[in-house]
């Protein structure tokens, strides 16, 4: 049984809108909690978010039956805290069990509260949030932010669009260490499957993995020029790699024979069939890497970039070289964001196998779909293409998209116009948003799988907007207190004059 929040408060529980958050603290946690508190106080935003949480978290399960589970509002808070604070589940586990203000925001009483969150409970519940749900929640949060700053919704929005790389948690890929990943994974999976079937073919699996690792290390050392005491020739490099490939082939062939024997003896169960599918996938990875090593080292060919894989466990990882100083290459996935003039991120997109020029029009259309008053947008040169210039001019009142190469007289006149130049100067402010996202979780994604990657990015976007609301709310409260203090000072001054 799941509810968005309990229908009735328990003894000692404080309403979320009344939870005291230290106004003097400059840490990120109070800002996030203050932003969540403001969204909770905003009746329109609260009702819309609660309705979405109830409809889209585990939609196929009956939330009125079964044991009581974590409230949907608590799940949302935990997901935001984990990503925005850039912490792992272990740190989140420590915070939710021992941080008093966070526990009050989660609905626990201020005394006699012994409720304990288990680490696996946190992982299982946060994974229930979907990127599609977070995209809808983000629109509600941004709208609540506009109400906070008293923005008139008829006023035009001006966007700044840019992309950056969210790195995946992978090691630097080479063809020989990718072959090692494939081979040792096959050995481990086949060994576990054989043990369940009572087969003794892979009883020395740990030794087998060490043999593969030893051959991989020999191939790796054969290419190092620092070993001046030995004259490493090209033939020695080839010999070491051929030996490594032969070791890998022997274990991959043995794995194929074991799978054939298991299938021939009896029909595999559903769980065994899934394991066999994973084994076959990694065998194909190993076969591809052996072919590429043979072509590159033995035959001297150059492997085309399109044929390369940069991670076996996170195959969506891309090799990205953006030409940044000191950062020759990044391993991850591009993410494009759209920021408005109020520093809210109105939309984002995970750019799988896409470049900047392929998402420019789509980003603008989606932003206009969410906020109809979206009037202008600025880009950098990476988003330019002739078709983009034409299509964006139909969608927006002002398109600030610098052209590449030598400019024609018409292009010069456009790019030297006052509104174009003024907007282009303000475009660099989007780098501040990117840096803030990287500091608050999007430097790299530790989660496994492309769906988890998209959820992680979406949580970071929503968390950043909520933190922005928290900062604005704190500033407004401080200004109000300052005005109140000044009024009291004037009153006291007048009283002192009358008394004198």
Image (cartoon, rainbow, N blue to C red):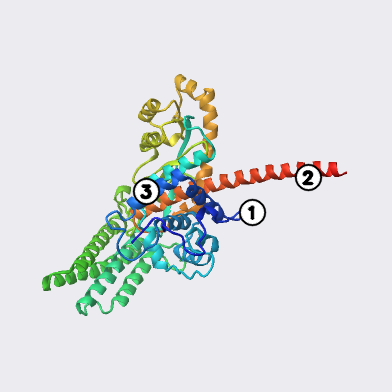
Q: Which mark is residue 24?
A: 1
Residue 193 in view here: yes
First in residue order: circle 3 vs circle 2: 3
In which quadrant of the rendered view does residue 381 lie? top left
Instruction: From this view, report whether residue 135 is shown above or below residue 426.
Output: below
10 Å crowding of disc 1: few (<14), some (14-19), many (20+): few
Instruction: From this view, report whether residue 371 is shown above or below residue 258.
Output: above
Q: Quadrant of the C terminus?
A: top right
Q: Residue at the spot x=31%, y=54% of the render?
A: 300
Relative image position of residue 206 (x, y in whole percent): 32, 76
Task: Describe residue 206's horizontal placement relative to residue 256 as left or right.
Answer: right
Describe the element under mark 2 as helix, strand or loop. helix
Foreground tag (2 vs 1): 2
Instruction: From this view, report whether residue 230 is shown above or below residue 30.
Output: below
Q: CA distance from mark 3 to mark 2?
A: 50 Å
- Total of numbered circles in the picture? 3
Q: Which mark is residue 492?
A: 2
First in residue order: circle 2 vs circle 1: 1
**Mark 3 — residue?**
51
Q: Choose between 182 and 164: the one closer to the eye.
A: 164
Q: Choose between 217 and 39: the one closer to the eye.
A: 39
Q: CA distance from mark 2 to mark 1?
A: 25 Å
Q: Residue furthest right?
A: 500
Relative image position of residue 440 (x, y in whole percent): 50, 53
Describe the element under mark 1 as helix, strand or loop. loop
10 Å crowding of disc 3: few (<14), some (14-19), many (20+): few
Q: Choose between 360 and 87: the one closer to the eye.
A: 87
In which quadrant of the rendered view does residue 386 lie? top left
């Amino acid at each position: 049984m799941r509810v968005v929040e309990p229908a009735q408060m328990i003894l000692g529980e404080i309403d979320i809108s009344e939870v005291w958050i230290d106004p003097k603290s400059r840490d990120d946690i109070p800002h996030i909690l203050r932003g969540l508190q403001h969204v909770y106080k905003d009746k329109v935003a609260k009702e819309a978010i609660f309705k979405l949480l109830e409809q889209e978290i585990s939609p196929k399960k009956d939330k009125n039956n079964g044991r009581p589970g974590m409230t949907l509002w608590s799940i949302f808070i935990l997901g935001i805290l984990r990503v925005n604070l850039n912490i792992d589940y272990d740190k989140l586990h420590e915070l939710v069990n021992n941080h008093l203000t966070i526990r009050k925001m989660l609905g626990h009483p201020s005394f006699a509260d012994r409720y304990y969150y288990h680490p696996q409970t946190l992982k299982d519940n946060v994974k229930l949030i979907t990127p599609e749900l977070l995209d809808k929640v983000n629109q509600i949060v941004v709208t609540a932010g506009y109400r906070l700053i008293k923005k008139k919704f008829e006023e035009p929005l001006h966007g700044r669009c840019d992309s950056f790389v969210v790195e995946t948690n992978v090691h630097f890929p080479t063809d020989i260490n990718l072959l090692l990943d494939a081979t040792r994974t096959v050995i481990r999976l086949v060994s576990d499957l054989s043990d369940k079937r009572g087969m003794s073919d892979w009883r020395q699996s740990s030794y087998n993995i060490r043999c593969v690792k030893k051959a991989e290390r020999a191939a790796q050392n054969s290419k190092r020029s620092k070993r001046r005491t030995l004259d490493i020739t090209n033939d020695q490099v080839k010999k070491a790699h051929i030996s490594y490939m032969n070791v890998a082939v022997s274990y991959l062939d043995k794995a194929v024979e074991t799978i054939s024997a298991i299938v021939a003896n009896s029909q595999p169960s559903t769980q065994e069939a899934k394991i066999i599918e994973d084994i076959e996938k990694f065998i194909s990875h190993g076969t591809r890497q052996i072919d590429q090593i043979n072509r590159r080292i033995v035959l001297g060919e150059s492997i085309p970039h399109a044929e390369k894989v940069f991670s076996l466990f996170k195959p969506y990882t891309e090799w990205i070289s953006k030409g940044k100083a000191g950062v020759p290459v990044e391993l991850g996935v591009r993410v494009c964001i759209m920021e408005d003039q109020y520093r809210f991120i109105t939309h984002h997109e995970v750019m799988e196998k896409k470049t900047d020029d392929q998402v420019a029009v789509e980003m603008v259309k989606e932003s206009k779909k969410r906020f109809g008053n979206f009037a202008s947008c600025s880009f950098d040169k990476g988003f330019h293409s002739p078709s983009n210039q034409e299509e964006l001019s139909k969608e927006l009142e002002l398109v600030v998209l610098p052209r590449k190469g030598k400019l024609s007289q018409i292009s010069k006149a456009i790019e030297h116009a006052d509104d174009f130049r003024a907007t282009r100067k303000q475009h660099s402010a989007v780098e501040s948003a990117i840096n803030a996202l990287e500091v608050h979780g999007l430097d790299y994604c530790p989660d496994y799988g492309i769906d988890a990657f998209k959820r992680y990015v979406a949580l970071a976007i929503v968390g950043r907007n909520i933190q922005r609301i928290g900062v604005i709310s704190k500033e407004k409260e401080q200004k109000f207190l300052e005005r109140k203090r000044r009024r009291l000072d004037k009153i006291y001054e007048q009283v002192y004059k009358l008394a004198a």
